[in-house]
Image (cartoon, rainbow, N blue to C red):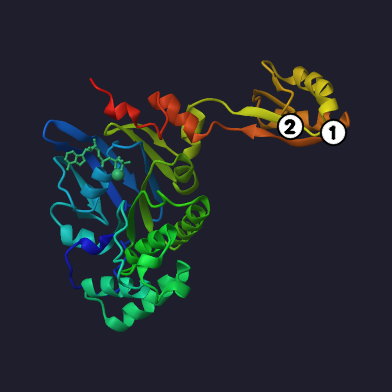
C-alpha cells in the first residue's frame, strides 16, 4: 500500500498523464543487484496508458524487486524507469503523486475501522477532509465494504483486507497503479470479485502493473504479459501470443452417449490424424485443423445424429506455456533452494 511513503501535500485529485503516446509506465534495462546476486537482470517494458501489464513469475523471480524500483522504494543498480513520464530516481515525488501501490503483504491498520483506514491515508496525503470522506464512502461501496465500514479491520476476512488494501491505494485517485500479487491467499470467489474491480478501474482509464504467480490471473487481466524467471525476461507477449507460441490448439469432442463412441471415432478419423480416445470420459482429442474444419466436423456429427456434450478448440493453458518456457511449473519454487 502506498501509505508507508512519506506524507506530502498536493491538490486532489491527481491529474492523469497528458495525452501523447508516452507510456504511463516504462522500464529501460533495469538491473538490481544485492551484493553479488542479481535479482533483476536487464528488464525493459513499456505500459501504454489505460492498459494492464502482467509481470508473471515464480517465487524469487524478481517481481517485488522490480515493483520496488518502479515505485521509488529501491534505487536501480542501473537502468532507468519512468512513471507518468517522471524518472523514478530524479523525480521521486512526482512519481509518488501519480501512483498507488498495493504491496505484497497487507498493511491495513488492524485496530482502525475500514473507513478510518481510508481516512488515515487521506490525512497522510494532506487531502481535504471532506473530500476524503466522500472518496472513502465511494471506495467502501465499490469494494463491497460499506456494511463493514465501521468494523475494525481485525475482524475482516482475508479477502476484505485485501480489498481494503486496494481501496487505500486508490484514495488519492492515482492514474497509475502497482499491485504486487493482489490476490495471493484469496479464495476463488474473492479473487474473481477483485478481478472485476480491477477491470473496472482499467475501464475508467487506470494503468495497471500487476505481479502474479497465477497464470490464469495474468490471462484474465493482462493486455500483455512479461514472464520473468531468475530476474530475466523469458517471454513477452499477449496472453494469446504466449499460448500460441507454446503449441497448437487441440480439437476436443465430448460425445453425449457412450454407445456413439465408435461412430464418432469413424467420423473424426476422416478429418484428423493422431486421434486420441478416452472412452471413460467419452472424449476424443486431436491436433486442431482450425476453426473451418471444426464447423465441418460439427456438421458431420449432426448429420449422423450423434449428440455431443461439447465440441471446441482448446488452446494450451498458460501453465503449459510456463512449463515449456522454464522447464518447471510456475508454482514450483524448488529450483531456488537446490544446493549448487
Ligand atoms: N534486500 C534484499 N537483499 C538480498 N536479496 C534480496 C533482497 N530483496 C530480494 N532479494 C532476492 O532477490 C530475489 C528476487 O526477490 P523478489 O522478492 O523480487 O522475488 P518475487 O518474484 O517477488 O518473489 P515472490 O513471488 O516470492 O514474492 C530473491 O532471490 C530474493 O531473495
Ligand atoms: Mg514478491
Q: Earlier in the sequence, mark 2 or mark 1?
A: 2
Numbered label attached to residue 302? 1
Q: Residue 85: x, y in percent? A: 24, 55
Q: Residue 339: x, y in percent? A: 24, 22
Q: Give the residue drawn at x 28%, y 31%.
A: 230
* Labels 2, 1: front one: 2
Q: Is the residue indicated by label 1 positioned so its CB lies within 8 Å of ligand 1? A: no
- Visible residue check, residue 49: no
Give residue 286's quadrant in the image.
Answer: top right
Q: Where on the image, by quarter, is ligand 1?
A: top left
Location of the C terminus by quadrant is top left
Q: Looking at the image, which is closer to me, 50 or 159?
A: 159
Give residue 138's quadrant in the image.
Answer: bottom left
Q: CA distance from mark 2 to mark 1?
A: 14 Å
Horizontally, residue 183 falls left or right of residue 268, namely left
Horizontally, residue 102 falls left or right of residue 309, namely left
Q: Residues within 10 Å of mark 2 (few under 14, many from 20)?
A: many
Instruction: Please say if 150 is above or below 281.
Output: below
Q: Residue 202: x, y in percent? A: 43, 58
Q: Secondary structure at mark 2?
A: strand
Location of the N terminus by quadrant is bottom left
Q: Secondary structure at mark 1?
A: helix
Horizontally, residue 153 falls left or right of residue 92, namely right
Instruction: Please say if 319 is above or below 185.
Output: above
Total count of labels: 2
Q: Looking at the image, which is closer to me, 239 or 101?
A: 101
Instruction: Please say if 129 is above or below 22.
Output: below
Identify the residue under disc 2: 254
Numbered label attached to residue 80? none
Q: Looking at the image, which is closer to me, 195 or 242?
A: 195
Horizontally, residue 321 falls left or right of residue 178, namely right
Q: Give the residue drawn at x 42%, y 71%.
A: 140
Amino acid at each position: 500500500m502506498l501509505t508507508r511513503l512519506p506524507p506530502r501535500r498536493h491538490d486532489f485529485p491527481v491529474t492523469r498523464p497528458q495525452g501523447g503516446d508516452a507510456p504511463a509506465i516504462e522500464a529501460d534495462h533495469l538491473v538490481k543487484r544485492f551484493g553479488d546476486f542479481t535479482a533483476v537482470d536487464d528488464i525493459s517494458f513499456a505500459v501504454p496508458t489505460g492498459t494492464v501489464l502482467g509481470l508473471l513469475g515464480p517465487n524469487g523471480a524478481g517481481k517485488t524487486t522490480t515493483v520496488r524500483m518502479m515505485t521509488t522504494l529501491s534505487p536501480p543498480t542501473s537502468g532507468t524507469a519512468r512513471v507518468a513520464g517522471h524518472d523514478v530516481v530524479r523525480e521521486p515525488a512526482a512519481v509518488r503523486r501519480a501512483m498507488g501501490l498495493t504491496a505484497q503483504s497487507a498493511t491495513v491498520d488492524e485496530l482502525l475501522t475500514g473507513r478510518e483506514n481510508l481516512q488515515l491515508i487521506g490525512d497522510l496525503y494532506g487531502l481535504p477532509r471532506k473530500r476524503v470522506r466522500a472518496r472513502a464512502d465511494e471506495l467502501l461501496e465499490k469494494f463491497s465494504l460499506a456494511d463493514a465500514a465501521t468494523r475494525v479491520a481485525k475482524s475482516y476476512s482475508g479477502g476484505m483486507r485485501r480489498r481494503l488494501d486496494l481501496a487505500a491505494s486508490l484514495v488519492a485517485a492515482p492514474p497509475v497503479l502497482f499491485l504486487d500479487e493482489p490476490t495471493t491467499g484469496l479464495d476463488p470467489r474473492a479473487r474473481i470479485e477483485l478481478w472485476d474491480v480491477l477491470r473496472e478501474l482499467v475501464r475508467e482509464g487506470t494503468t495497471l502493473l500487476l505481479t502474479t504467480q497465477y497464470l490464469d490471473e495474468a490471462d484474465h487481466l493482462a493486455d500483455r504479459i512479461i514472464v520473468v524467471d531468475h530476474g530475466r525476461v523469458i517471454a513477452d507477449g499477449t496472453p494469446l501470443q504466449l499460448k500460441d507460441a507454446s503449441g497448437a490448439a487441440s480439437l476436443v469432442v465430448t460425445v453425449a452417449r457412450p454407445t456413439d463412441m465408435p461412430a464418432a471415432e469413424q467420423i473424426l478419423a476422416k478429418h484428423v490424424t493422431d486421434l486420441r480416445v478416452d472412452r471413460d470420459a467419452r472424449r476424443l482429442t486431436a491436433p486442431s485443423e482450425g476453426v473451418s474444419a471444426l464447423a465441418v466436423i460439427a456438421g458431420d456429427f449432426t448429420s449422423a445424429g450423434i449428440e455431443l456434450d461439447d465440441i471446441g478448440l482448446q488452446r494450451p493453458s498458460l501453465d503449459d506455456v510456463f512449463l515449456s518456457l522454464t522447464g518447471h511449473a510456475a508454482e514450483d519454487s524448488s529450483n531456488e533452494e537446490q544446493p549448487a
